[in-house]
Image: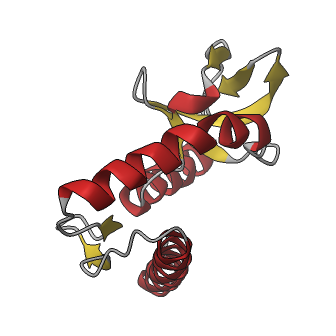
Amino acid sequence: MTNESLAQLRAEKLDQARTVCACLGSALDSIGVPLPGLTVEQTDAGDYRLALGSLDIDPGKELAFAVLAGAPVLHAIKAVPDADELLVDTSTGRLGKFRGVDGKRWWLAAPFDNDEPWTADPHKVREPTVNERVRADMVAAIGRKAE
């Protein structure tokens, strides 16, 4: 992955983080739980995270209630990834490509070798970080050169 591609990927991630931050702030404001400290921060690794800031106890209770009340709906509508989308199974730390759905679990397969696919809990799967994507691209490039 070139420096230009990496810079573009990071810019896209920053835009995504800012959009999510604005949406979360708006949603919380709408239920009376403003988070004045809600911001986007860049980690030492170059990834972006939402910083929630500090929250008084009463708005914290309201936020916890809203999250708990909405959790069943969120689990029901969680989007299924596109085929071959890179994901990280947080229960194992493995990087895999999405291969399909098996009941309530997702099939993932190692992206660069012939390891057996495995199933993962969709609630324990996340998008890879920029650094994880770069490493995956480097492994793919090395594999192509070896052929």
Quarter residue 108 falls in: top right
Relative to 85, residue 137 above or below: below
The residue sitting at 82% across, 14% down in the picture is 103
Relative to 47, residue 105 above or below: above
Q: Would you say 120 lies left or right of 80 here?
A: left
Percent across and percent down for residue 97 are 67, 37
Residue 47 in view, yes or no: no
Q: Would you say 57 lies left or right of 138 here?
A: left
Relative to 143, residue 34 above or below: below
Residue 42 in view, yes or no: yes
User: Which residue occupies the foreground of this view, 141 or 83?
Assistant: 83
User: Which residue occupies the foreground of this view, 147 or 98?
Assistant: 98
The residue sitting at 62% across, 46% down in the picture is 86
The residue sitting at 73% across, 22% down in the picture is 107
Q: Would you say 50 lies left or right of 99 here?
A: left
Quarter residue 41 falls in: bottom left
